[in-house]
Image (cartoon, rainbow, N blue to C red):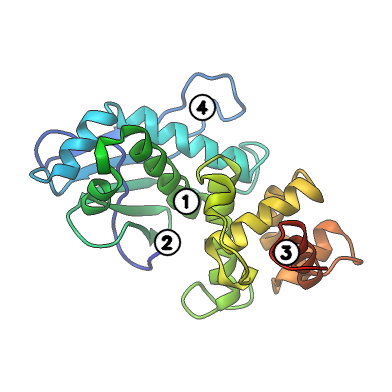
């Protein structure tokens, strides 16, 4: 979820007390093309140190710097080919752990990014002391929110707050990155029916299906289409990437048949 003009942070590790941990995110030496890329200065703040969720997090993620950076590289490698691509600059990523309702949301602008993560959601995800379940959920949510930090946005058709097309693209791509990197539980988490304009998983699973069945570079090309198709539209981007013979609604129908949600 993306929020406008809010400074929140999704943190994947807790520190003792409520103090702010300022760490410069640096690349993990894994030999990939993102070596040396500055993902931004990571600011971690635990605003709920007395909660059970904070205590749980403190135990499962001991190194926020490495973990957040690792997931940032996963997002970047899903959306871009190399460091030379047109990547929105991210100067700061402010993660806060908060004792509030909800799950997580991204805010901020102009390279100053913030995301909150709810200790209440952490506690719900840790039912039956299932560490693997919580870790899986934590990574998936982080992939989604970090996508909002680095993804490109459609131009010439309004903004996230006033255009359903922009909203569906942004939230759909964030969940597509999560789907593409194993952040959901496959078919179990795929919503049935609906439409790509519903965003989130409806669009995310659809976009990954296009990648798997039409063009292995689709997610990168779809992200980049926001710079190349102006004013942007779903159908304009599809035709730009796959060819004039393709239509977004026909592809949705083909996808729905392929996954068994409707009959031919």
Q: Which mark is residue 144?
A: 1
**Which residue appears at 71% of the width and 69% of the height?**
234
Give whichever of discs 2 and 4 has the lower sequence position: 2
Is the residue under label 1 in contact with that under label 2 (CB below 8 Å)? yes
CA gap, disc 4 and disc 1:
23 Å
CA gap, disc 2 and disc 4:
28 Å
Instruction: State the SS at label 1.
Output: helix
- Give the side of residue 139 with respect to residue 85, left or right: left
Instruction: State the SS at label 2.
Output: loop
Q: Position of residue 67 (x, y in %)?
A: 38, 31
**Which residue appears at 81% of the width and 57% of the height?**
241
Question: Quick one: 55 or 77, which is closer to the camera?
Answer: 55
**Which residue appears at 70% of the width and 72% of the height?**
233
Q: Which mark is residue 256?
A: 3
Query: Depth-wise, is mark 3 or mark 4 nearer the camera?
Result: 3
Q: Position of residue 185 (x, y in %)?
A: 52, 45
Q: Position of residue 3 (x, y in %)?
A: 38, 66
Q: Is residue 198 above or below residue 35?
A: below
Give whichever of discs 4 and 1 has the lower sequence position: 4
Is the residue under label 1 in contact with that under label 4 (CB below 8 Å)? no
CA gap, disc 3 and disc 1:
24 Å
Question: Quick one: 103 or 187, which is closer to the camera?
Answer: 187
Query: Depth-wise, is mark 4 or mark 1 nearer the camera?
Result: 1
CA gap, disc 2 and disc 1:
8 Å
Q: Which mark is residue 254?
A: none
């Amino acid at each position: 979820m993306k929020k406008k003009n809010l400074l929140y942070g999704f943190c994947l590790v807790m520190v003792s007390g409520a103090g702010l941990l300022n760490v410069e995110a640096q690349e993990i030496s894994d030999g990939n093309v993102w070596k040396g890329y500055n993902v931004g200065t990571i600011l971690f703040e635990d605003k709920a140190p007395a909660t059970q969720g904070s205590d749980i997090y403190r135990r499962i993620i001991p190194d926020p710097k490495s973990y957040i950076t690792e997931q940032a590289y996963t997002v970047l490698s899903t959306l871009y080919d190399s460091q030379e691509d047109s990547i929105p600059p991210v100067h700061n990523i402010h993660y806060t752990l908060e004792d509030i309702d909800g799950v997580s949301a991204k805010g901020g602008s102009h390279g100053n990014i913030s995301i909150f993560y709810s200790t209440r959601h952490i506690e719900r995800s840790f039912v039956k002391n299932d560490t693997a379940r919580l870790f899986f959920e934590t990574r998936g949510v982080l992939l989604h929110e970090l996508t909002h930090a680095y993804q490109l946005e459609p131009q010439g058709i309004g903004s996230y707050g006033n255009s359903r097309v922009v909203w569906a693209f942004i939230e759909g791509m964030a969940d597509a990155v999560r789907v593409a990197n194993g952040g959901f539980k496959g078919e179990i988490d795929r919503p049935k029916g609906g439409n790509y304009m519903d965003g989130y998983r409806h669009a995310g699973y659809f976009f990954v299906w296009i990648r798997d069945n039409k063009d292995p570079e689709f997610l990168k090309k779809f992200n980049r289409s926001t710079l190349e198709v102006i004013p942007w539209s779903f159908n304009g981007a599809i035709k730009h990437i796959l060819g004039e013979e393709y239509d977004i609604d026909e592809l949705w129908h083909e996808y729905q048949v392929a996954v068994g949600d409707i009959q031919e």
